Image (spheres, rainbow, N blue to C red):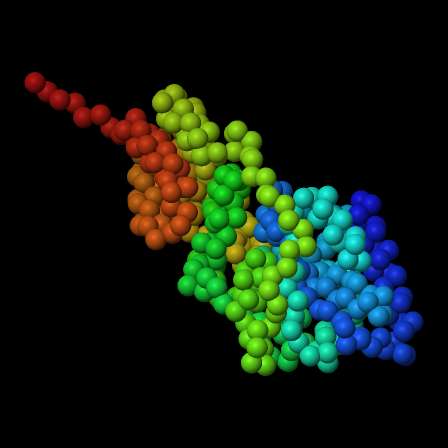
Amino acid sequence: MNLSFLKKIVFILFLIGFINSSFAQRIILSKHTLTSVVTCNTGNESYSLFGHTAIRIKDIENNLDVVYNYGAFDFDTPNFVVKFTKGDLQYFAVAHSFTDFMNEYTYEQRSVYEQVLIIPLAFKQRLFDNLNTALASEERYYTYKFIDKNCTSMVVDMLNKTLGSNVIVKKTNTDKTYRTILYPYFENSFYEKLGTSIIFGKKVDKLGTQIFLPLELQKSLKDIQFENHPICKENKILLDYTKKTASPWWDSIYTFVFLLVFIIVLNKKSIDLLYLVTMGLLGVFFSFVGFYSFHHELSYNYNLLLFNPTLLLLLYFQYIKNKKWISNLCLFNIILILVYFVIMLNKIHLLIVLPLILTNSALLIKMTIRNSKRISVVI
């Protein structure tokens, strides 16, 4: 565990102890209490690409300024990578002092915004009680899901539970798919954009009707009414940093296209075979995680038409030198690529996979020609 994580645990234990020792005399928030949704801007690291959401409770009279969030997990969890891939990794709620929370984002140089909720004191008290009850019980744990269960959706659920109905609903981009909504977040991370484009399946092509990203919640709150008035005040900037968007020279579509063109121009049988087998291996991986993982975003992956596991059979047919079946298998995959291209016509990630479509097609056509029977011409 790192020092930051230990500090969080110590603060949680302190807060739980404070709450438990005070339960007989329940903490009553003063009329000056402020409750707010805190939104942290995106960062350049993989874990921070989508930003973060938290809830802040501030009551000067009770010497209270606490930030609650549902974005914590333990890197020391046994089989961490396996659990994360499978989709049964446990995330949990944590509480920070507001000062510690802000220090972390000051260090990371990420902007932080606050929207103060305009709700009666009774609802502020209920929110405070609900958060503390969850923090001191098994309710603070949840199984992370990319769209359905994350730091933002859990905050939305907590707010709706407190307000007694589905007040917090999505107000923006409801006519766009989840994939389209996610796409701009990878603007300066080409290979992460490519990776998510090909590993995500059919679910992310559905209309994004639920709030699952911090900045989406922030935008929606501006348009939500509660008891005939806006539910929050104007957005307040707590930290303001200009996001640094520089990326490594190699992390671009240019290096990607250069590599694929190089493979085609090189015109080596062994390299062509290695490339197509690699595509097949990726297809096996996508198939495995689609069936194995509880992340529904990875299932029903039509990208398997491009990354087809049957390409692995090329190794076998090449080994036994069966030109007929090499040719047949290549033609089969060319047909699948045509089907894939038609499916992709209305998808936002068509352009990013187009170089792969063209490369696969070129190599399969070359391999088909190489292994087709030559027709003798008698003059």
Task: Give me the residue at 65% from left, 73% from top.
Answer: 118
Q: Residue placed farthest to the top in the image?
A: 379
Which residue, as the protein is rendered here, is positioned at the far right?
21
x and y percentages locating residue 27 in the rendered image:
84, 75
Displayed quadrant of residue 34: bottom right
Across and down, in percent, residue 201 comes to: 47, 54
Give the residue at the far left of this rendering: 379
Residue 86 locus on image (x, y percent): 62, 53
In the image, what residue occupies the spot 63% across and 45% down? 241
Whether residue 359 appears in this view of the structure is yes
The reply, left or right, for residue 39 in relation to residue 202 is right
Q: Does residue 70 lie above or below 23 as drawn?
A: above
Q: Is residue 93 left or right of residue 53?
A: right
Quick one: 322 or 305, which is closer to the camera? 305
Q: Nearer the viewer, residue 305 or 235?
A: 235
In this rendered view, identify the residue nearer to me: 100 or 157: 100
Relative side of 118 to 61, left or right: left
Residue at 7% across, 18% down: 379
Residue 370 in the image: state x and y as whole percent.
Answer: 30, 26
Q: Is residue 323 visible?
A: no
